[in-house]
Amino acid sequence: MKRAWPGLILILLLLSVGPAARGQDDPWSRQWQTARTASVRVYHAVGEPVPAARLRQLERSLQRLAGELGLTGTELGSLRDYPIDYLYAPDAASLSGVWVGDVDGMALVAERRIIASRLPHEHELVHVLAHMAISPAPAHNHPFVQEGLASYLGGHLGESPGAVLALGDAVLDRNPGLVPRILTVTGFRESILPDEECYAAAARFIQYLDRERGGLDPVLTVLRLMSGTLAEEVVARPASFVEVQFEGTYGTPFAELLEAFEAWRREHPVAGVVPAVPVQRTPDFRLADSDHAVRWWREPAGWVIAVEPLLDRVDLALVWGSSAPQPGTWTGPAGRTGYELRITEEGARLIDHGRGGVV
């Protein structure tokens, strides 16, 4: 989450009851009904229960992310007695007074509390689990590592980690020397770049550290070193402070670490949808209407899809999976399961409606 400080005051008032208060005095219990997994207590609107399949997915996501972060059995076991409190409001507009900016969730890590308009919200789960992994540690931290780690493992704004990393490459290509400029809290929060671009660039750097520099344990060490008791204390730290924490953890001057990162990034592009030339044979599948023409080839290396606008723009959705369009149609809204490839003037997005996110 980024730039939600005004809403944080409201949240602290709403959640002023401490973790030990779990009875009728808890405002969440008075205003919401609850459901429970082994590790999470979910608060949902009265009359809008969370499907069991969604609760199971929440627990699976939590267990997977906890494993990636190296939480011990004892740490995970503590969630049975002291679960994560998860306030789930699918209608984000109903929580408009809680946060500002383009966000769909927030985490209060010290209290093990999440407020989100998606479930499971893996990005916010990572925040809480990462804080458990570095405990005991103060709750405030530098967003470059904190948000980079959460975006790397949990995605961001409904996009999968892979989609975030692909964006990170594009952002870093367009903005040489970006990483040193977003190391500080101010540099990250007040960057001229959109929020999601800073998150994505940081996620790509964290991926490099994970893949090439010893896994996530050293990343958590840096996170622990940079935690602080007061928000003002963390905000005041210069970039040199952050660089020293990386240098001490990885035994490498920060400039060399950045140089190695750029070299690795060039050698390890993010897999995903890439431009391809149309195949020189009859397409396996062809669709057309008065606005669009679509040709689709099935090749050993994957699918090749060519879309030609017959008017001024491209705007279509190809849907496949367990929820197919009506017979005789080839565009239309996707159901709650299956995949949707939505193509517009701004590019293409592959949406997994089963998991509820951009792949």
Image (spheres, rainbow, N blue to C red):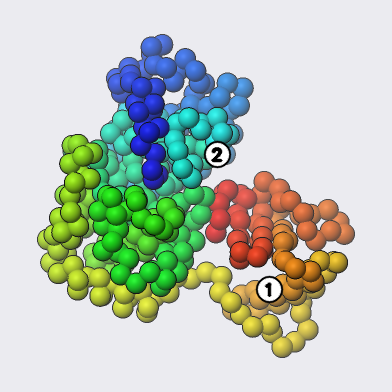
Q: Position of residue 69 (x, y in %)?
A: 31, 51
Q: Is 130 on the left-hand or right-hand side of 326? A: left
Q: Does residue 244 sit above or below 80 in this rendering? A: below
Q: Does residue 161 sit above or below 230 in this rendering? A: below
Q: Residues within 10 Å of mark 2 (few under 14, many from 20)?
A: few
* Residue 349 or residue 320, whichever sits in front: 349
Q: Quadrant of the N terminus?
A: top left
The residue located at (55%, 30%) in the rendering is: 94
Residue occupied by mark 1: 305
Residue type of the residue flagged with mark 2: Arg
The residue located at (61%, 80%) in the rendering is: 276
Report whether residue 137 is seen: no
The residue located at (66%, 76%) in the rendering is: 304
Q: Is 331 on the left-hand or right-hand side of 359? A: right
* Residue 141 or residue 352, whichever sits in front: 141
Q: Position of residue 235 (x, y in %)?
A: 22, 45
* Residue 80 or residue 274, whichever sits in front: 274
Q: Quadrant of residue 259?
A: bottom left
The residue located at (50%, 21%) in the rendering is: 32
Q: Is 256 on the left-hand or right-hand side of 297? A: left
Q: Among all residues in the image, which is located at the extreme top?
A: 24
Q: Residues within 10 Å of mark 1 (few under 14, many from 20)?
A: some
Q: Quadrant of residue 295?
A: bottom right
Residue occupied by mark 2: 54
Dot 1: what SS? strand
